[in-house]
Image: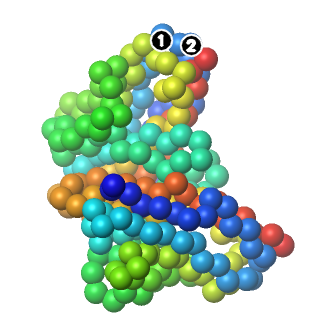
Amino acid sequence: AQSVTQLDSQVPVFEEAPVELRCNYSSSVSVYLFWYVQYPNQGLQLLLKYLSGSTLVKGINGFEAEFNKSQTSFHLRKPSVHISDTAEYFCAGLIQGAQKLVFGQGTRLTINP
Amino acid sequence: DTGVSQDPRHKITKRGQNVTFRCDPISEHNRLYWYRQTLGQGPEFLTYFQNEAQLEKSRLLSDRFSAERPKGSFSTLEIQRTEQGDSAMYLCASTSGASGYNEQFFGPGTRLTVL
């Protein structure tokens, strides 16, 4: 199946704690991978993307992700979260041979003070 | 504001009515996408345009749905004879170039509620 799977629907963390949001992709998804963030009542915004090259990708707002081909994963991390990081996070991949993205189900990140 | 805009932001309609949504992409972007997002799910691809040509449609896009991009600028998505299952957020995104891996810029969405 052509899919992207986000393993956690919700992740609660305390402010200033590290966080990891997990994403796995199927073999029929290409290795063009993306993380988008959706703040309440706003459109999706690109955090970072992996196309090729270094497997550690740095994005906006202090986020980074690591592409792991052997584990077909593209987990998102931040060493210290802030209240303003409260949002829904979506992992997405480009379908092999197509021009469209397939999204995971999303992970709601909740930051507790 | 030069981002992607969508109109209306919210639409409440009765079952069986027709609705039309508009998307204005970033002006120099030649590619435009429509997605549908239901509660608790990620966006699902519906269709995309390269300039005025509609190049792909998802199986989710039943014959009640039609999308146009007549001059390669703004796009409309029409749903005829709406059903309660059509209730969702409809997202529009645009990008430049001919490669799917270019960043897609998303609008704020149109939330449709079918009563």
Can residue B92 be seen here? no
| Up/down of A1 relative to B89, above or below | below
Q: Do the residues bearing badges 2 and 1 touch, measured as CB atoms within 8 Å?
A: yes
Q: Quadrant of the C terminus of chain A?
A: bottom right
At 47% across and 33% down in the image, what residue appears? B7
Q: Secondary structure at mark 2?
A: loop
On residue B14, which mark appears? 2
| Up/down of A96 relative to B72, above or below | below
On residue B17, which mark appears? 1
Q: Crowding at label 2, few (<14), some or many (≥20) Cα neighbours within 10 Å?
A: some
At 36% across and 69% down in the image, what residue appears? A33
Q: Secondary structure at mark 1?
A: loop
| Up/down of B95 relative to B57, above or below | below
Q: CA distance from mark 2 to mark 1?
A: 6 Å
Q: Is residue A106 left or right of residue A10?
A: left
Total numbered labels:
2
- Place of residue A12 in the rendered image (x, y in percent of width and height, measured from the top left): 74, 68
Chain of the residue where label 2 is placed in the rendered structure: B
- Place of residue B26 in the rendered image (x, y in percent of width and height, measured from the top left): 34, 50
- Place of residue A18 in the rendered image (x, y in percent of width and height, measured from the top left): 67, 83
Chain of the residue where label 1 is placed in the rendered structure: B
Amino acid type, label 1:
Gln
Q: Quadrant of the N terminus of chain A?
A: bottom left
Amino acid type, label 2:
Lys
Q: Quadrant of residue B12?
A: top right
Q: Is residue A51 left or right of residue B51?
A: right
